Image (spheres, helix red, strand yellow):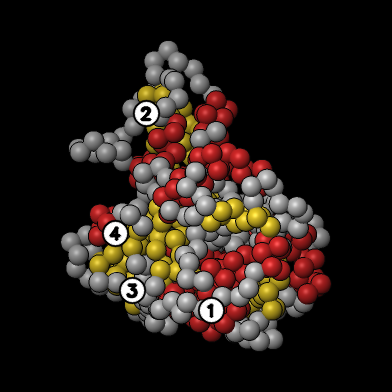
Amino acid sequence: MLSLNSDRYTEYYFAVWWAGGVVVPMNTRWSLSEIAYSLEDSGARILLVDSAFSGMLPELTEHVPELDCVIYTGEDPAPDGALSYEFLVSNTLPVSDTMRREDSLAGLFYTGGTTGFPKGVMLSHEGLWHNGLIVAAACDINSSSVVLHVAPMFHLADGCIGLAASIASAQHVYVPSFDPEAVLNAVEEYQVTHLLLVPTMIGMLLQHPSFSAERVRSVQFILYGASPMPEGVLRLALQHMSHVRFVQAYGQTEMSPVISFLSSEDHVLDGKHAHRLASAGKLATGCEARIVREDGSEADTGQVGEIVARSPGSMLGYWNMPELTGAVLEDGWVRTGDGGYFDEDGYLYIVDRMKDMIITGGENVFSAEVESVISTYPGVAAVAVIGIPSKRWGEAVHAIVVIQPGVELDDAEIVEHCRARIANYKLPRSVEFRTDPLPVSGAGKVLKRELRDPFWEASGKAVN
């Protein structure tokens, strides 16, 4: 499905599962080539598309001739070659539940790939069901709750709270995409009690001229995650929405996605437990995690290593990528690529990323993909892409470009070169030029830590 948020998206999930199919939600921020790649890679045969993206259909159907059927979910007449969603609903007999089992494949959720294209994470029905249950419990979602879909519905951040709402028989409310005024209006009109927001959205909501605590007085819980929460934004949120209970979820797509929760009780600014605000909380019900040293041994309490996690939400693997699956998944344990440690009370702290990834505005950007694109521009001798602190996005994509002798380049050239080849959120937000070579290790690998350090030294850690 390629669509903005709507009730059709919820119907899509449950109808596909009922019929025995597999969902393949498309990132609405992808470029045409990324969408076409994921459709081809997944082997998708049916595409649902709304009015916001129907203009891409001629090119998409040309690039992906394997599509058997396109279904248009808009209210107006369907484009040529597409079936009408409304017509099908009104003129098709119901089918029996195919009774998919717990370990059956429920969906391919594409996430950023080190090869330059997204990779499909295979998630099971059991994994998604488990995450719906634990989110409902963590945020006290019940049959009287009103849940607003704000984050994009292709993303598992929204997916987990949407499933929690359905499991609890709560009411769903939708805004097509994030807009502060639209969110505030929806909260007031429908008396919304629960939202999931990416930290960037919380910051933008607080900064909106018409924001007031009165306008969000119906809100009981805000679940946030998908990217790190800047401490300043969280403090403002706790001050200006003191009646709201905040819950942080830490996880990743490969875990369906939750690993841990920082409960509302731990969101305190003062007192002996105020330091826990910097943590990712405690492990979610049904989830195990270990901190592993480079040699594979288990780290001691307080010692940093890679976070390795296991739960009913552990992925089945990467679609058509057995080697990568073997490197990340073993006996249900998922290597997260995140560096962290446990304190004496069992709270999990994230300190660094052990895989080369930038999280900007809740989206994953792999630097290798951006580097690959920039490296093709005339006059570029070498390039390294890193994440640097950003008050608005958590992290911003920053490119360090070594130029060839006698060549002059500027920021706009590099950004425009990237714009036609990768999604907008992956574009460099800043570009630094140099003539000296990049620092490298004895093995010839670029020492990105040395490049990052000047930007991060003031924060004391390597994620924002």
Residue ID at (49%, 55%): 45
Where is mark 1, residue-wise? 96
**Label 1 vs 3, first from the N-terminus:** 1
Q: CA distance from mark 4 to mark 3?
A: 14 Å
Residue ID at (44%, 61%): 108
- Residue kind at label 2, given as amino acid type: Ala
The image position of residue 129, as x and y in percent, is 48, 78
Q: Quadrant of the N terminus?
A: bottom right
The image position of residue 188, as x and y in percent, is 80, 72
**Label 2 vs 4, first from the N-terminus:** 4
- Residue kind at label 4, given as amino acid type: Thr
Residue 234 visible in image = no
Say which quarter of the image contains residue 217: bottom right
- SS assignment at label 4: helix
Where is mark 2, residue-wise? 382
- Residue kind at label 3, given as amino acid type: Arg
Q: Give residue 325's mark.
A: 4
Residue mark closest to the camera, 2 vs 1: 1
Residue mark closest to the camera, 1 vs 4: 1
Residue situated in front as seen by the camera: 418 or 60: 60
Q: Give residue 130's mark.
A: none
Q: CA distance from mark 1 to mark 3?
A: 34 Å
- SS assignment at label 3: strand
Callout 3 crowding tier (Cα within 10 Å): few <14, some 14–19, many ≥20 = many
**Label 2 vs 3, first from the N-terminus:** 3
Residue situated in front as seen by the camera: 21 or 197: 21
The image position of residue 299, as x and y in percent, is 24, 69
- Residue kind at label 1, given as amino acid type: Ser
Q: CA distance from mark 2 to mark 4?
A: 30 Å
- SS assignment at label 1: loop
